[in-house]
Image (cartoon, helix red, strand yellow):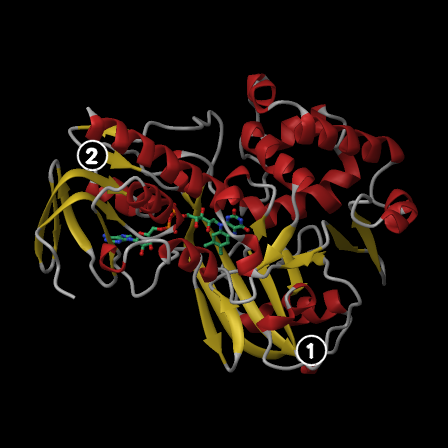
Amino acid sequence: MTQPTRAEVVVVGAGLAGLAAATRLAAAGRDVLVLEGSDHVGGRLSTDRIDGFVVDRGFQVLNTGYPRVADLDLADLDLGYFRTGARIPGEGTTHRVVDPRSRPTTLPATVTAPIGTLREKAALAAFSVRAGYLPVRRLLAAPERTAEEALRSAGAGGESLDRFLRPFLAGVLLEDGLETSSRYLDLLWRSFVRGRIGLPARGMQAVGEQLAARLPVHALQLGRRVTGVTPGEVRTGSGSVRADAVVVATDPATAAELLPGLPASAPRQVTTHLHVLPTSPWDEPLLVLGRPGGPLVNTVVLTDAQPRYSPDDRALVASSTLAPTREADGREEIARAHGVATTDLAHLTSITVTGAQPAAVPPLELRRPVDLGDGLFVCGDHRDTPSIQGALASGARAARAVLRQLRA
Ligand SMILES: Cc1cc2nc3c(=O)[nH]c(=O)nc-3n(C[C@H](O)[C@H](O)[C@H](O)COP(=O)(O)OP(=O)(O)OC[C@H]3O[C@@H](n4cnc5c(N)ncnc54)[C@H](O)[C@@H]3O)c2cc1C
């Protein structure tokens, strides 16, 4: 496909933010062109097939509690769900902490699990009610601090913090110091309270593919890396495209290169090791947390939630570490967490993503400006929250800003 020389709006990047912006602009009747540097849509939600297994580039999940999930067709994604909660390793056993709303029979085991005092568990329940049901504006009006300070002052410090909350949140925030903003923690916890955690049958990349399918065929070009952006013009290796508006929807580091003056957020990284087991050792889809101080953040049998990730009855296991690790260094810990022999684990692949998501430390400016003036716009998870929700929401905001400018 040849590269056009003009479009009303050029969107740089076909991650969720760019696709959220482009689909809205196209639906509003605008002539939009999306230039994507890689060979696939979905950006950081990308999926490979290895030996018949569905392998996401890093363990990630779709949280149906995100408000912008309303833009997706969940039935078409055919989600397989995890239970909200976790298995926590103890001395020679594991304890389950499960959201009792999803399975009331787990309540006694959750309440009596030797992870923190009853008072801490009650405090966590109260924290959940507050985050889940207070209006967002009231959550955002609370004084900002670090996630750890917020949890401690809510009464959820102590053992429950170190054995459950810290490793659980480390897998989501990709940091275990809990230095992330309490505002983001509130919004994130709200989505856990209000939604479920799932994996699409065709892998996480299916989320971006679903959005891309809403674009006119000629509106998306893959393999078009943008090398420069100026007001009214975008340059690639194939020449330049003139445009009334340009939306830079890349990862934060590239956005800072293309738009000098835009601050680049510090990136979080994660390494995920994928293994195959002959069958799952568990009877329910639940995350297993790493031990405090151990190399693993978490490990999970993906096929317990989404059987379509395996071509047959074998189980696919994803195990994550924050620091880059070699597979051989984590294997014993992974086997112990699932109660299997190390020889049962067949290594499929390992993936390190260095720019997995931008840090969201205080002071966190939620909803950073997306209209930079002169017909230049920016969106991406670095403009809202470091998440699928943040990417989709920022894309929607950028589209609204572009439409305002085009109408003016
Ligand atoms: C391993 C991992 C686990 C995660 N876990 C979760 C999770 O469980 N829940 C959650 O909500 N979020 C999670 N995230 C974060 C989430 O994936 C991101 O916040 C979100 O996908 C960011 O979308 P985006 O559109 O802002 O950016 P991106 O997805 O980075 O999209 C940017 C696009 O721009 C393209 N691009 C870059 N440079 C150029 C250029 N010069 N020219 C043209 N195109 C270019 C890229 O190829 C890419 O397609 C995780 C991320 C990773 C990597």
Q: Is residue 175 visible?
A: no
Quarter of the figure that contains the C terminus: top left
28 sits left or right of 51 in the view: left
Hey, what amino acid is under mark 2? Leu
Q: Residue 88 sits in which quadrant?
A: bottom right
Badge 1 marks a residue whose secondary structure is helix
- Label total for image: 2
Tell me: residue 110, above or below residue 128.
Answer: below
Q: Residues within 10 Å of mark 2 (few under 14, many from 20)?
A: many
Q: Is mark 1 within 8 Å of ligand 1?
A: no
Pointer 1: what residue? 342
Mark closer to the chain start, 2 or 1: 1
In-front residue for pair 231/254: 231
403 sits left or right of 48 in the view: left
User: Which residue is farthest front?
Assistant: 29
* x, y percent for residue 13: 29, 51
Pointer 2: what residue? 376
Q: In front of the other: label 2 or label 1?
A: 2
Q: Residues within 10 Å of mark 1 (few under 14, many from 20)?
A: few
* x, y percent for residue 397: 37, 33
Tag shown at residue 391: none
* x, y percent for residue 118: 88, 35
Tell me: residue 4, above or below residue 317.
Answer: above
98 sits left or right of 135 in the view: right
Residue drawn at point x = 82 percent, y = 33 percent: 120
Q: Kindly report the distance in space between the C-alpha atoms of the residues bearing marks 2 and 1.
A: 53 Å
Hey, what amino acid is under mark 1? Thr
Tell me: residue 202, above or below residue 184.
Answer: below
Q: Is residue 298 visible?
A: yes
